[in-house]
Image: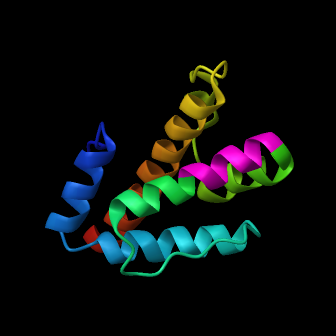
Amino acid sequence: MSLPKTFDDLIEEAESLKLYKKLVAQLNKDLLLANIDLEFDIETLPTSLKLVLQETVYHLIQNKFSDYLNLLYQVDVSELKIRTLDNEDLVKLSEDVTFLILQREWQKVWYKAKY
């Protein structure tokens, strides 16, 4: 499996394989397990999903760092990938982390559908 390189590629692949709703469901499951008070409707548009998740990640980084770390652990985002991100600009960091979260969730959904 080659991972999508951009958010648009990820969404395009998820929709073409008819797995977008499963992606949202998997994200909701991991948010719940990480005790993050956020749940997306299955019909949420991809752009809304990205923006709301990014705002949440930004808020967690600034105000609830332990919850942020717990979310990364629950989703199973690679620590190496997180360390390579530029953490000078929090807005850019939250955008990059949001993509890594969605990318990891996509991996989970893709593997479950494939095998």
Numbered range of the magenta stretch = 54-62
Image point 26% across, 42% down: which residue?
2
Residue 5 falls left or right of residue 70: left
Check the image and report above or below for 53 versus 8.
Answer: below
| Residue 70, image x, y percentages | 76, 54
Q: How is the image coloured?
A: rainbow
Q: Please, which residue is most extreme toward the bottom here?
A: 42
Q: Please, which residue is most extreme toward the left here?
A: 16
Image point 75% across, 42% down: which residue?
61
Image point 42% across, 49% down: which residue?
103
| Residue 26, image x, y percentages | 49, 72
- Asked whether residue 71 is drawn in magenta, I would say no
| Residue 3, image x, y percentages | 31, 43
Check the image and report above or below for 12 versus 79.
Answer: below
Image point 73% across, 67% down: which residue?
36
Residue 114 falls left or right of residue 59: left
Foreground: 56 or 36? 56
Check the image and report above or below for 79 versus 14.
Answer: above
Secondary structure character of the magenta stretch overall = helix
